[in-house]
Image: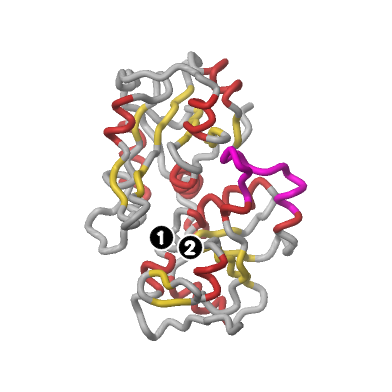
Amino acid sequence: MMDTLVSTDWLSQHLEDQDLVVLDCSVLVDVETGQTSSGRAEYEAGHIPSAGFADLTGDLSDESSPIQWAVPTPEQFCAAMGELGVGDDSRVVLYDSSMSFWAARVWWMLRWVGFDRAALLDGGLMAWRAEDRPLSSEPSALSANQLTPAPRPELIADRDEVRAAIDDEAVHLIDALPEAIYSGEQAMYGRPGHIPTAVNICTMDLLDESGRYRPHDELAALHDGDRSERTITYCGGGIMASASAFAMTRLGFTDLAVYTASLQEWAADSTNPMVVETP
């Protein structure tokens, strides 16, 4: 069996496994402008041997939507993953070149379509490179496969569910963004603050200095809620929120969803309330 979080040592020992599909999910972010672009060129320059490239800026998203990284239909997503070699009996390891947030988004969507044989590489490409492990510029040699969708729609929340959650004490909202954005000190998508009733657990706090997830007891201390109650994570575009949902799944939360459109959609509608923390 494969854990949902694997080490660089584990991956190095299993790279030749016939059922293993490794995917680089990197998206590049311009630190000055915040603009994002495909990590394909970086992948082509050097990636973990045998890895394919999963493009969240391309066919893993609904490119017809005005929402960036909008979720495609389960059938479209499974078809795209099948082209990358992922089949019903595959095992999948996902990584990216930053903090594993993009890889976590793909992990969550795999879970959403009913596929549970996926893991994140703890520390991602940064950890692999830091240990001077081999890189390749060769494309993946995996053939197309068949991934059958068995959707779990409850794993993705929409705007209406989030609106209803504001007035429902049994549903919990978690803002995965940095505290400065949550409080309203910095605006995101043109509006400051957070969705009413949301608590702030920044995804960055779930990782250590190397980009690896913190130990189980430290993560558990940050998430003291009822693990059986409905919980929805959100951020700016559903990316950091997916990484938070990944950690919470490992902690045993059983009724968890990601608001994948997040503040991209919420902040664009002035009728959607937002709260600014007062000093």
Give SS at disc 2: loop
Q: Residue 235: give its label.
A: 2
How far across and how far down the image is residue 221, in percent? 76, 55
Which mark is on residue 237?
A: 1
Magenta segment boundaries in residue numbering: 206-220
Tag 1 near tag 2, CB within 8 Å: yes
94 lies above or below 109: above
> Seen in the image, is 18 located left or right of residue 41?
right
Q: Residues within 10 Å of mark 1 (few under 14, many from 20)?
A: some
Badge 1 amino acid: Gly
Q: Could you tell me which residue is drawn at 46 percent across and 41 percent down?
A: 98
What amino acid does circle 2 point to? Cys
Against 12, residue 239 (above or below) is below
Distance of mark 1 from mark 2, alpha carbons? 6 Å
Left or right: 272 in relation to 121: left
Q: Determine which quarter of the picture holds residue 48.
A: top left
In terms of depth relative to the viewer, which is nearer, 268 or 60? 268
In reply to whether residue 68 is colored magenta, the answer given is no
Element type at mark 1? loop
Q: Quadrant of residue 5?
A: top right
Percent x, y for residue 1?
Answer: 63, 26
Q: Which mark is residue 137?
A: none
Name the residue rendered at 32%, 20% in the picture. 137
- List x then y, in percent, for residue 62: 28, 54
User: Does residue 207 belong to the magenta stretch?
Assistant: yes
Farthest-out residue, left: 64
Give the dominant element type of the magenta stretch: helix, strand or loop. Answer: loop
Q: Around disc 2, counting alpha carbons within 10 Å, would you say few (fewer than 14), some (14 to 19), or many (20 or more)? A: many
